[in-house]
């Protein structure tokens, strides 16, 4: 199992109150029982959509398990996400069939366009990008789930179309040259 990445996103000010209240309610449900650490983490993720660092600290304090151990559990299991999900979630299938038909190239294209590596969320929280295992429609490989809708036989050229469909502004060829300092 691959270890998860360190959280990069800090919760916004007004989110901290919500985080503390939601974590409190989950802790109450499990009576802060340290043996229920995984269900507690699952419950908090179900409420918040991810496991903020602040939530893990609060849990560690309540169940009296060292922070590093709680964090270790949160980072070990792929089911837990440490960054907030984007408004639009892009999941690139990396099962065998999709991998063999260009899944990695599709992932690279999204990473380049969104300017984030897989497993992360754009700073404006519009998009999150992650890899998933076989989603069960290998005949349509390579497959991308866009907000749980299946995009079939995706080619790198389709990546821009998907993002444009959400109103994302893509750099034009001229702007790209300017950014890269290649304008004459
Ligand atoms: S490997 Fe991608 S759908 Fe099966």
Image: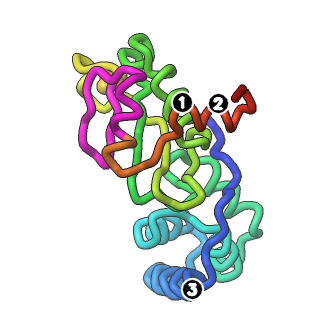
Q: Which element carries disc 1, helix, strand or loop? A: helix
Determine if the C-beta at disc 3 is less than 8 A from ligand 1.
no
- Residue 137 image offset from top left, x and y in percent: 23, 25
Q: Of residues 107 and 81, which is closer to you in this image?
A: 107
Which of the image's four quarters has the C terminus? top right
Left or right placement of residue 159 versus residue 180 in this view: left
Image: magenta residue range = 143-162
In terms of sequence position, does the residue under pointer 2 or pointer 3 come before the other? 3
Question: Ligand 1 is located in which of the four quadrants?
Answer: top left
Q: Which element carries disc 3, helix, strand or loop? A: helix
Q: How is the image coloured?
A: rainbow
**Does the magenta segment cover residue 154?**
yes
The answer for how far apart the CA atoms under marks 2 and 3 are is 39 Å
Q: Of residues 29 and 179, which is closer to you in this image?
A: 179
Left or right placement of residue 88 versus residue 107 in this view: left
Q: Are marks 1 and 2 in contact (CB under 8 Å)?
A: yes
The answer for how far apart the CA atoms under marks 1 and 2 are is 6 Å
Q: Which element carries disc 2, helix, strand or loop? A: helix
**Could you classify mark 1 by the number of other residues whose Cα lies within 10 Å: few (under 14), some (14-19), or many (20 or more)?**
few
The answer for how far apart the CA atoms under marks 3 and 1 are is 39 Å
Which residue bears the numbered disc 2? Answer: 177
Q: Nearer the viewer, mark 3 or mark 1?
A: 1
Which residue bears the numbered disc 3? Answer: 14
Question: Residue 173, labelled with which disc?
Answer: 1
- Residue 45 image offset from top left, x and y in percent: 47, 65
In terms of sequence position, does the residue under pointer 3 or pointer 1 come before the other? 3
Left or right placement of residue 101 versus residue 56 in this view: left
Instruction: Say which residue appears at 22% left-offset and 16% top-offset.
Output: 139
């Amino acid at each position: 199992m691959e270890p998860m990445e360190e959280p990069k996103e800090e919760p916004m000010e007004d989110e901290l109150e919500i985080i503390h209240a939601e974590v409190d309610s989950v802790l109450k449900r499990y009576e802060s029982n340290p043996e229920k650490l995984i269900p507690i983490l699952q419950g908090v993720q179900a409420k918040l959509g991810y496991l903020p660092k602040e939530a893990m600290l609060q849990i560690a304090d309540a169940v009296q398990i060292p922070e590093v151990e709680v964090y270790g559990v949160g980072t070990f299991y792929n089911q837990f996400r440490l960054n907030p999900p984007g408004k639009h979630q892009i999941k690139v299938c990396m099962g065998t069939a999709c991998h063999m038909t260009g899944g990695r190239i599709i992932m690279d294209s999204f990473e380049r366009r969104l300017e984030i590596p897989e497993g992360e969320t754009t700073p404006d929280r519009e998009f999150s990008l992650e890899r998933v295992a076989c989603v069960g429609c290998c005949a349509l490989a390579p497959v991308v789930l866009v907000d749980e809708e299946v995009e079939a036989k995706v080619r790198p050229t389709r990546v821009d179309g998907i993002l444009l469909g959400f109103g994302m502004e893509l750099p034009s060829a001229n702007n790209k040259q300017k950014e890269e300092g290649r304008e004459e």
